């Protein structure tokens, strides 16, 4: 559709551009679609139903969304452009006009294409580029091969040429076919139509011709002759005030006064089931190209749209890759293309006949970039592709085996400059490759790796990173590399053989995973590598392994006997190693394991042993941790005032030492103690205060699980049943993550019994009974209280025989059945609480 004119407003539907007084206006995708719909039907009122059907097809949208878009259009175009017809809809009321009368504008001097490419999700990038070029300058648009630099730069040059009417024109100089850097200046002169006399240096002669001209030079694809281009442009900027240079390259020219903008791949939806996927540039480009390839006859069904989105996501939104993928859809279908993306470098080829050879296939585009790297940089690129989830500098240095960190930084700098690696924003430098680049680099690595097993080297390097992070207590680094550590652990276990790497990874990641609440994963990892605890593992590592297995197994995650046995093994090994501080930890955890099993005298004995290791001047952290177990033991003995004193003393130490995780756990412990003392409202306040200190990250998952389950119990004890139902839903999910669901079955039974769901409550009591019996775990005081209260309420509704029957059903339920029972009883949507109360 051609442009539409309404006074100072010009709408270009094909280019998805709106100009007001000649200046582009920023509009969102929905607002633009709404504007075009109203403008096309300006002869009538467009109803809201029609607008929703055309602008938000297939979606259920709140009416305020439409109001927001109307407001956005009125703000951009003026309030008189759109009129509200109450009760009917909207009408476009801007006055139509023809383009300004008079002689047609003179043709733009130069060789830029007449037609303008359609932009997909590049409005902000175009605006940034145009702003950078507004005054005579050198601007370099950098990006990986195939990211769309030429398209965007050409469109920007067309806008600039129309806006400024350069006296000597706007010229695109294609440099990709030049192999001799000495020919760069001559190629510029030839394109612009300047004849070189050949009597002097071509560069000086070129500068002499250009210095007094007013023109725009688009120097396209400079990367392979970057030094010659840099020399020419730097000299031109020094001698001319009327020449604007716009260059495209994999890397900056690195000259004085250069402005660098980087072009990233097109935006992709965060997930394949995004309800508004078509607003993302990658999806819009993909759909447009598929429709073109199929003669305009393509409207994806819902399941096909999921495939479209997933293709865009797996291809990282790279325009060239999407072009190739779209060209294969008529033959393979979108599902067929998606299923073959594991061979993307072979699949993605074709393209326009007039395209440069490097753009005839994805493989060729990457080879073009690759061949411009030095051998050392090529090797680094190949090896870093082994990282599946990006990497930090320390991980890269340990993996590459570089003698000096400065070498790693230098190579990363080159790869980032060439757009082969992207720096990920964050507090610590982190880097990643696009998946297409990574696959290409992995293929190169396989072809050149020789006898080096880089997968094994990757696993070893991640074990080194985890060991170093644990030694420094650098949990941030451990979390940053956790995705890589998980892959490395799987590789190490799969390969078998010496177990040192696998045991190191499982042991040191378990510390961080458990602290974050992902205790199920931590325990499963430790159990997974147990057969690999062999002579290749140094004694300190084995001791730590058994310590953490026993430590994480408490609270019924593992049978009590297994925890005690593992901790006793660890204690004996630490004794042989002469490590009293770790023995202190083993004794503390043995006390906790015995306490959970109901053996209070044994727990007291281990606490006395721990206290003996402290000496006259113990580390504050050790004393704080021992005091916490002392408080737990006092609670179990019914000495609640003593428990509060111990907990408060431990909390003071935790705050003084800045040990945030224990501070949060101690706040939860004190809430539990208040609840046992019958101070329900005080307990509610304690748990609510604790939750205000927590964020939603996995790192605080364990504290969050304790806080939410405590809040649930406190609220039902205080008679706040509706609040307890809401908290229970959140509590279930937090406990599932921390592998603690069974340990709080009685609390959930108490809540359901309070709302009259006696049969489900009885099943949860039975599940809790089976759990306690199966693990040998003695119920803690809160579980005992919750069970008594639940049973009393249940027996008000059921006779003893029915109660026994439903308890038996709950005791026989497996973990999956229990999870479904809890999910049904405590749905994720808080709005369902009313349904539960009515039930």
Image (cartoon, rainbow, N blue to C red):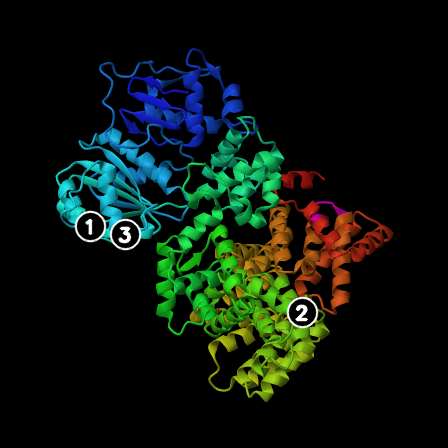
Residue 63 horizontal/vertical position (percent): 50, 26
Please state which of residues 29 and 62 is positioned toward the viewer in this rendering. 29
Please state which of residues 757 and 324 is positioned toward the viewer in this rendering. 324
Q: Residues within 10 Å of mark 2 (few under 14, many from 20)?
A: some
- Quick check: 548 left or right of 754? left
Q: Which mark is residue 256?
A: none
Going from N to C along the chain, the mark reached first, 1 or 2, is: 1
Q: CA distance from mark 3 to mark 2?
A: 61 Å
Query: Regarding mark 3 in the picture, which secondary structure is present there?
Result: helix
- Quick check: 818 left or right of 272? right
Residue 754 magenta:
yes
From the image, state whether disc 3 or disc 2 is nearer to you: 3
Residue 125 horizontal/vertical position (percent): 35, 40
Going from N to C along the chain, the mark reached first, 1 or 3, is: 3
The residue that disc 1 covers is 234
Q: Which residues are magenta?
A: 752-758
Please state which of residues 383 and 787 is positioned toward the viewer in this rendering. 383
Q: Is residue 99 visible?
A: yes
Going from N to C along the chain, the mark reached first, 3 or 2, is: 3
Rendered-image quadrant of the C terminus: top right
Residue 825 horizontal/vertical position (percent): 70, 46
Residue 777 horizontal/vertical position (percent): 72, 68
Q: Is residue 267 visible?
A: no
Q: Residues within 10 Å of mark 3 (few under 14, many from 20)?
A: some
The residue that disc 3 covers is 181
Q: CA distance from mark 1 to mark 3?
A: 15 Å
Query: Regarding mark 2 in the picture, which secondary structure is present there?
Result: helix
Q: CA distance from mark 1 to mark 2?
A: 63 Å
């Amino acid at each position: 559709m051609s442009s539409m004119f309404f006074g100072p407003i010009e709408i270009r539907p094909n280019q998805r551009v709106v100009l007001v007084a000649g200046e582009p206006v920023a509009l969102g995708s929905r607002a633009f679609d709404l504007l075009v719909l109203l403008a096309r039907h300006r002869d009538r009122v467009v109803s809201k139903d029609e607008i929703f059907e055309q602008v938000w097809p297939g979606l259920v949208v709140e009416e305020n969304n439409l109001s927001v878009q109307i407001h956005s259009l009125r703000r951009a175009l003026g309030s008189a452009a759109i009129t509200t017809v109450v009760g009917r809809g909207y009408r476009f009321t801007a006055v139509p006009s023809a383009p300004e009368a008079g002689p047609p504008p003179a043709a733009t001097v130069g060789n830029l294409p007449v037609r303008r490419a359609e932009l997909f999700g590049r409005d902000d990038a175009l605006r940034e580029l145009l702003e950078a070029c507004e005054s005579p300058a050198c601007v370099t648009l950098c990006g990986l091969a195939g990211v769309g630099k030429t398209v965007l730069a050409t469109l920007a040059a067309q806008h600039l040429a129309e806006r400024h009417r350069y006296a000597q024109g706007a010229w695109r100089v294609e440099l990709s076919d030049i192999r001799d850097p000495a020919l760069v200046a001559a190629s510029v002169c030839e394109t612009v139509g300047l004849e070189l006399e050949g009597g002097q240096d071509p560069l000086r002669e070129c500068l002499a011709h250009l210095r007094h001209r007013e023109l725009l030079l688009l120097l396209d694809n400079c990367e392979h002759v970057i030094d010659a281009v840099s020399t020419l442009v730097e000299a031109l900027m020094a001698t001319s005030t009327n020449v604007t240079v716009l260059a495209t390259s994999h890397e900056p020219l690195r000259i004085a006064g250069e402005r660098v903008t980087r072009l990233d791949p097109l935006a992709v939806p965060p997930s394949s089931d995004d309800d508004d996927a078509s607003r993302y540039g990658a999806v819009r480009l993909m759909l447009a190209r598929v429709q073109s390839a199929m003669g305009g006859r393509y409207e994806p069904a819902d399941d096909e749209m999921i495939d479209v989105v997933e293709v865009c996501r797996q291809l990282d939104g790279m325009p060239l890759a999407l072009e190739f993928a779209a060209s294969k859809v008529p033959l393979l279908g979108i599902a067929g293309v998606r299923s073959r993306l594991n061979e993307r470098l072979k699949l993605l080829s074709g393209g326009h006949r007039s395209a440069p050879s490097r753009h005839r296939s994805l493989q060729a585009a990457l080879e073009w970039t690759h061949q411009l790297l030095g051998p050392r940089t090529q090797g680094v690129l190949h090896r870093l592709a082994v990282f599946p989830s990006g990497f930090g500098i320390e991980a890269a240095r340990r993996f590459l085996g570089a003698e000096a960190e400065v070498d790693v930084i230098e190579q990363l700098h080159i790869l980032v400059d060439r757009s082969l690696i992207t720096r990920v924003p964050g507090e610590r430098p982190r880097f990643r490759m696009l998946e297409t680049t990574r696959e290409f680099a992995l293929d190169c690595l396989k072809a050149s790796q020789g006898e080096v097993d880089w997968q094994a080297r990757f696993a070893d390097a991640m074990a080194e990173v985890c060991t170093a992070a644990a030694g420094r207590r650098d949990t941030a680094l451990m979390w940053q590399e956790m995705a890589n550590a998980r892959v490395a652990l799987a590789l190490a276990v799969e390969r078998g053989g010496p177990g040192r790497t696998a045991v190191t990874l499982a042991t040191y990641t378990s510390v961080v995973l458990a602290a974050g609440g992902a205790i199920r994963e931590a325990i499963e990892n430790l159990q997974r590598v147990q057969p690999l605890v062999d002579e290749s593992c140094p004694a300190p590592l084995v001791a730590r392994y058994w310590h953490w297995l026993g430590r994480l197994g408490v609270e019924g995650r593992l049978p009590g006997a297994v925890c005690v046995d593992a901790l006793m093994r660890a204690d004996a090994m630490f004794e042989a190693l002469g490590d009293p501080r770790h023995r202190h930890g083993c004794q503390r955890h043995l006390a906790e394991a015995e306490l959970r099993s109901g053996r209070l005298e044994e727990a007291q004995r281990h606490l006395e042993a721990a206290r003996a290791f402290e000496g006259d001047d113990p580390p504050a952290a050790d004393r704080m941790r021992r005091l916490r177990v002392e408080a737990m033991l006092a609670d179990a003995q019914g000495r609640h005032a003593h428990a509060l004193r111990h907990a408060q003393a431990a909390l003071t130490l935790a705050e003084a030492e800045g040990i945030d995780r224990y501070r949060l756990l101690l706040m939860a412990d004190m809430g539990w103690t208040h609840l046992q003392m019958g101070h329900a409202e005080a307990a509610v306040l304690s748990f609510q205060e604790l939750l205000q200190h927590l964020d939603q990250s996995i790192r605080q998952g364990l504290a969050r699980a304790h806080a939410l389950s405590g809040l649930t119990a406190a609220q039902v004890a205080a008679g706040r049943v509706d609040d307890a139902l809401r908290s229970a839903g959140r509590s279930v999910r937090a406990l599932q993550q921390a592998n603690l669901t069974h340990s709080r079955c009685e609390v959930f039974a108490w809540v359901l019994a309070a709302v009259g769901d006696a049969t489900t409550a009885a099943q949860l009591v039975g599940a809790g009974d089976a759990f306690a019996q199966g693990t040998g775990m003695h119920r803690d005081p809160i579980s005992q209280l919750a069970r008594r209260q639940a049973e009393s309420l249940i027996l008000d509704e059921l006779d003893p025989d029915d109660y026994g029957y439903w308890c038996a059903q709950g005791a026989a339920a497996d973990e999956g059945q229990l999870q479904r029972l809890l999910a049904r009883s405590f749905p994720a949507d808080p709005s369902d609480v009313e349904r539960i109360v009515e039930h």
